[in-house]
Amino acid sequence: GPDGIKLEAGVKWSVATVDATKIARELLGIPIVNTAMIGALLKANEVVKLESLFEPLKERFGRLAERNINSMQKAYEVTVVREGAK
């Protein structure tokens, strides 16, 4: 399984990693990781389409939406997902 995690035999697993703090600092100027983590979540498990969140983010963040959307997209692009079974 993933490094440092003990799993029972036959267990399927997946782990997604991203440096959300780095992305937030670079694109937002502050270490608030909310939208970056949404991007990572959607890379790991696409419960909704990434693009479907653009309009709600624009409504919520107004003029700050573009930076939050960029943060979410960047995290989506660079998130690494590992899957396997023990």
Image: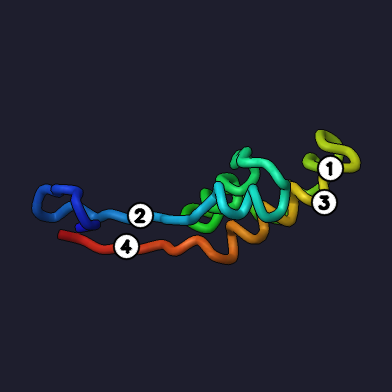
In contact (CB < 8 Å): disc 4 and disc 1:
no
Percent from the top left, x then y, of residue 6?
14, 48
In contact (CB < 8 Å): disc 2 and disc 4:
yes
- Say which amino acid is labelled 4: Glu
54 left or right of 73? right
Which of these two is toward me, 75 or 83? 75
- Residue count near mark 4 (Cα–Cα under 10 Å), binned few <14, some 14–19, many ≥20: few
- Say which amino acid is labelled 3: Glu
Which of these two is toward me, 15 or 30? 30
Of discs 4 and 1, which sits in the foreground?
A: 1
Residue displayed at 48% across by 53% down: 45
Q: Which residue is mark 3?
A: 66
Q: Which residue is mark 1?
A: 64
The part of the image, by quadrant, that contains residue 30 is: top right
Of discs 3 and 2, which sits in the foreground?
A: 3
Q: Earlier in the sequence, mark 2 or mark 4?
A: 2
In contact (CB < 8 Å): disc 1 and disc 3:
yes
Q: Is residue 85 above or below residue 31?
A: below
Q: Earlier in the sequence, mark 4 or mark 1?
A: 1
Q: Earlier in the sequence, mark 4 or mark 3?
A: 3
Residue 15: image tag = 2
- Separation (CA) of disc 2 from disc 4: 7 Å
Residue displayed at 64% across by 49% down: 25
Q: Which residue is mark 4?
A: 83
41 left or right of 71? left
